[in-house]
Image (cartoon, helix red, strand yellow):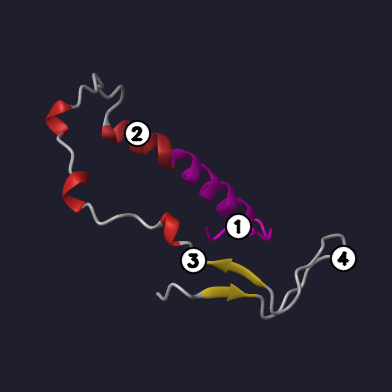
């Protein structure tokens, strides 16, 4: 990455209600002021000093079930709709 690197608009399409920047306009540049210094050894922490006073309220299996159940319910709904001839759009996030 070069310090002189910039982002320039090559082409731009936007709804009429928004002001559009012009082609060739510089919209981003590198600012060395935001660079992080190379202080690797000072970034090390000591976990023995942490006083978290935390304990889990549920087990891992309970948490997984809590997270997966809504997805399984939705999959069952989609399967039922599809089995009865309905088109189902499935998000691919």
Q: Which residue is mark 2?
A: 63
Nearest to the observer: residue 81 or residue 90:
90
Nearer the viewer's eye, disc 1 or disc 2?
2
Q: Residue at x 87, y 65 (%)?
A: 16
Query: Gap between marks 3 and 4, in whole Å?
Result: 30 Å
Say which quarter of the image contains residue 6: bottom right
State the SS at label 4. loop
How far across and down, in percent of the image, does residue 91 sit? 58, 58
Q: Is residue 65 left or right of residue 43?
A: right
Where the N terminus falls, by quadrant?
bottom left
Question: In the structure shown, which secondary structural element does the residue marked by tag 1 occupy?
Answer: helix
The residue where tag 1 is placed is 83
Q: Nearer the viewer, mark 3 or mark 2?
A: 3
Q: Which residues are magenta?
A: 69-93
Could you say where residue 38 lies in the image, as x and y percent from the top left? Answer: 25, 57
Q: Residues within 10 Å of mark 4 (few under 14, many from 20)?
A: few
| Marks 4/1: CA–CA distance | 44 Å
Q: Is residue 86 magenta?
A: yes
Residue at left offset 58%, top offset 47%:
77
Q: Which residue is mark 4?
A: 16
Judge left or right: residue 61 versus residue 49: right
Q: Earlier in the sequence, mark 1 or mark 2?
A: 2
Q: CA distance from mark 4 to mark 2?
A: 48 Å
Residue at numbered disc 3: 30
What is the CA distance from the residue labelled 3 to the residue labelled 2? 43 Å
């Amino acid at each position: 990455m070069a310090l002189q690197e910039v982002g320039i608009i090559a082409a731009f399409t936007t709804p009429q209600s928004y002001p559009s920047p012009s082609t060739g306009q510089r919209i981003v540049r590198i600012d060395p002021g935001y660079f992080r210094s190379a202080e690797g050894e000072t970034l090390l922490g000591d976990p023995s000093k942490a006083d978290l006073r935390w304990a889990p309220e549920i087990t891992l299996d309970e948490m997984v079930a809590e997270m997966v159940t809504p997805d399984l319910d939705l999959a069952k709904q989609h399967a039922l709709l599809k089995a009865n001839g309905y088109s189902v759009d499935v998000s691919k996030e």
